[in-house]
Image: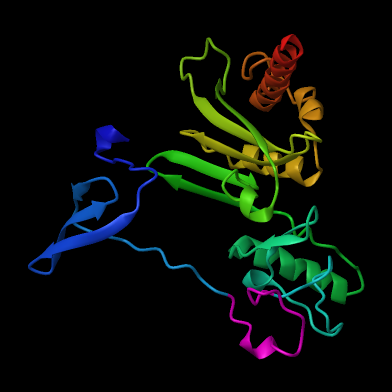
Amino acid sequence: MQTKQINFYPNEFLIDWKKSEEKVVSVQLLSQTIKADMVIFSAQTRPNTTLLKEKVALYEDETVIVNEYLQTSDPDIYAIGDIVPVSFDKNKRHLFLPLVTRAVHMARAVALTLSGQPTAYDLRQKITAAVIIDYFLGTVGLTEDEAPFLEQNTGSCSGEFDLFPQYDEENKTVNAKLIYHPDTLEIIGGQLISQEFLLSDLNLLADIVKHKTTIPQLAVEDFGFLSEYTSRFHYLNELAFKVLAKRANSNRVDKRL
């Protein structure tokens, strides 16, 4: 990205910016000042549930409390879309996350229920993806930064893997990361970064999280294999094995101590 004059400044805070003749000329970060010609601010959205107050039960952030069928505390009222948060059954915590795709699938679930085919919706599902400067960025479930706010302890493991056999001239890679509970080894999140469009792999990772797959189960999960087109083991297999190897080495050191 630096070859395209795109620079990242992680772990920084925007303190101020300077203008000259009504144009931005620089921004002051926590540790340095850099030249700039534009500043873009992100504005966090909030659920608009004013009409629902005193009619249905709400969380403290004014999102709507629903059951697995998206039914509110009033059995005649259902809720879908941004006003329904992502929920985590481990400690009843929730996370406000406006996503259009959630609203669409929720609408289908409610329509099926109302037509006589009761259909539950998994409120834990959280899938986001974007393509930025030729890079695919995708995340499912919890991230390490979100976990502390939801009072969840996590372990993580990441690595860079070849997407195709080593003799393939393209030599495309993926940076993958798994987030898991250290006590049960249940996988609760993951991220993918690659110059390949890996939305299908991200959906696969979402299913892994949805079905509460553990690290050992993923390590031996059977994926499709074609010797001319795929590596012997899927990179998610390899990443799960990496977690187990890391834990085995840690246990060995502890025993020596």
Q: Is 213 on the left-hand or right-hand side of 82?
A: right
Residue 221 seen in render: no
Q: Residue at x 16, y 61 (%)?
A: 18
Magenta residue span: 47-63
Q: Is residue 80 above or below residue 42?
A: below
Say if the magenta span includes residue 56.
yes
Q: Is 66 on the left-hand or right-hand side of 9?
A: right
Q: Indicate the position of residue 24 as horizontal and vertical percent values.
A: 17, 61
Viewer-proximal residue among 110 and 75: 75
Q: Is 37 on the left-hand or right-hand side of 93?
A: left
Q: Is residue 203 above or below residue 62?
A: above
Q: Indicate the position of residue 92 as horizontal and vertical percent values.
A: 78, 60
Q: Indicate the position of residue 213 as horizontal and vertical percent values.
A: 80, 37
Res. 236 image quadrant = top right
Q: Indicate the position of residue 48 as horizontal and vertical percent values.
A: 59, 81
Give the residue furthest to the front.
257
Q: Residue at x 78, y 78 (%)?
A: 78
Q: Is 136 on the left-hand or right-hand side of 91?
A: left
Say if the magenta span includes residue 222.
no
Res. 80 image quadrant = bottom right
Q: Residue at x 59, y 64 (%)?
A: 100
Q: Is residue 236 above or below residue 7?
A: above
